[in-house]
Structure formats: structure tokens, C-alpha cells
Amino acid sequence: KQEVTQIPAALSVPEGENLVLNCSFTDSAIYNLQWFRQDPGKGLTSLLLIQSSQREQTSGRLNASLDKSSGRSTLYIAASQPGDSATYLCAVSIIQGAQKLVFGQGTRLTINP
Amino acid sequence: GAGVSQSPSNKVTEKGKDVELRCDPISGHTALYWYRQSLGQGLEFLIYFQGNSAPDKSGLPSDRFSAERTGGSVSTLTIQRTQQEDSAVYLCASSSGQGKNQPQHFGDGTRLSIL
């Protein structure tokens, strides 16, 4: 059974810092890995999707990497801003049927002005 | 364009009542997913619809849960004889269904509270 773990569970940093969020998964049989952002009381916003054959994806100040063989992904946020405060979730799309997503528990990020 | 729309945004009901949650996916998206987000369990898959294929119901926690998708568009998730442990946020997502690497787009969810 696929399990996804995110470390740390919570992170608080001053504005302007670069930071890294970590995600690990137990089964490398995935189609892709997605990073999402969730604001309080809201749904999930897709940030980046990395296909299983890819190593990284970039969007603006965000860079996500994927090492499928070791079951790890990182989300790098450059020059953090207070507006980046949210919960960040990683999820893998599993090959065994339905392309359903298996989620980690998330990292709650706070950027202090 | 319009995103995934869910209604109601909040629902409070008494234990034992039936509830219906609605999801309107992005126009043209053939794949539709329901997930549940609860404090203790995180986000977990419930059910998946793809076009006219039989749905994947493998995530439904009990036979009190059912879902249908009419005309390949709107979906309703029904919970019968609700229990307090059903309290959670129910999230719907859709994707284009074209290939294995299409992102899932989520609605804002329905927050269900069972008294």
C-alpha cells in the first residue's frame, strides 16, 4: 500500500528566506507526483506536476524535484513571501487503477513579515 | 473559465439523516473524483468516474456511501444514515481524462458536520 509522508509537519520562517519542503513515498509505481497548496477553508490549488519520467518542474519561484527510485520529492520556494503561507500537500498518482491520488498529511507553512 | 463547483459549501445535519453533496466539474472534463478530508485521516480517495466506464468505488468506506454521475457531468455523493464519524470536508476534483498526467483540479469542498 502506497504511503506518503511529509516533513516537517509545520514550518515558520521569516520573509525572504529560501525553503525546502520534503515528501517521501513508499512505492515507486507512480504516474506522477503533484504539489498542491491549500488555504484555510479552501480547496486545493495545483502548483506543479512532475511526470514519473521527469526530474524536476519549475513555476516562478517554485521548483519541485522528483527522485522516483528513492521515493523522494522536494518543493523549493525561493524568496518566500507572507502570501506563501498555506498548507502544502504532495500527492502521488498511483498506477494501480483510477490514477487516484494518495496524499501526504501536509506541511503547514507560515512566512512571517 | 469556471472551476470545479461544489454545493452546499457547508452542511449541518443530525445523526441518522441522509445528505446529498453536489459537484459540477470543469466543462469538458471526463474524469471526476471524490475525496474526503478529515482531521485524523488526512485526504483520502472515495470514488472515481471516467466517461461511461464503471466507476471505481474502492475508496467508499461503507455501503452508506454512494455516488452517481449523470450525463457525464454533474455528480452527487449521497451519505445515508449519517454518523458522527462522517463529519469531514468532502472535496471533488476533475481532470481532462486525456492521458495519465493531467492535473486534478479541486473545488472548495463541502464541510459536513454531523450533530
Image (cartoon, grey):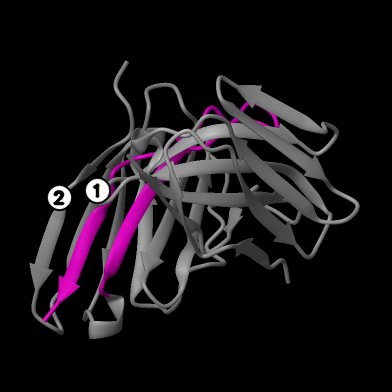
* Residue of label 2: B8
User: Does B14 appear above or below A62?
Assistant: below
Q: Looking at the picture, how far across and down is residue B96, in whole percent?
A: 54, 27
In which quadrant of the rendered image does the N terminus of chain B lie? top left
Report which residue position mark 1 lands on: B22
Residue A91 shows in this picture: yes
How many marks on residues?
2
**Type of amino acid under label 2:** Pro
Q: CA distance from mark 1 to mark 2?
A: 7 Å
Give whichever of A99, A5 is nearer the camera: A5
Q: Is residue B56 magenta?
A: no
Q: Quick check: can you spot residue B18?
A: no
* Residue B111 at x, y percent in the picture: 21, 60
Asked if the stretch drawn in magenta spans residue B112, the answer is yes
Amino acid marked by disc 1: Arg
Going by the picture, which residue comes out furthest to the top? B1
Asked if residue B16 lies left or right of residue A37, the reply is: left
Q: Is residue B108 above or below residue B84?
A: above
Name the residue at 47% across, 28% down. B29
The picture places residue A45, in percent across and down from the top left corner, at 42, 37
- Look at the numbered discs 1 and 2 and tell me whether their residues touch, using CB distance below 8 Å: yes
**Location of residue B18 in the rendering, given as x and y in whole percent from the top left corner:** 17, 72
Q: Are dots 1 and 2 on a single chain?
A: yes
Helix, strand or loop at label 1? It is strand
Secondary structure type for disc 2:
loop
Against B40, residue A74 (above or below) is above
Q: Nearer the viewer, mark 1 or mark 2?
A: 2
State the extent of the magenta-drawn residues as a range.
B87-115
Q: Earlier in the sequence, mark 1 or mark 2?
A: 2
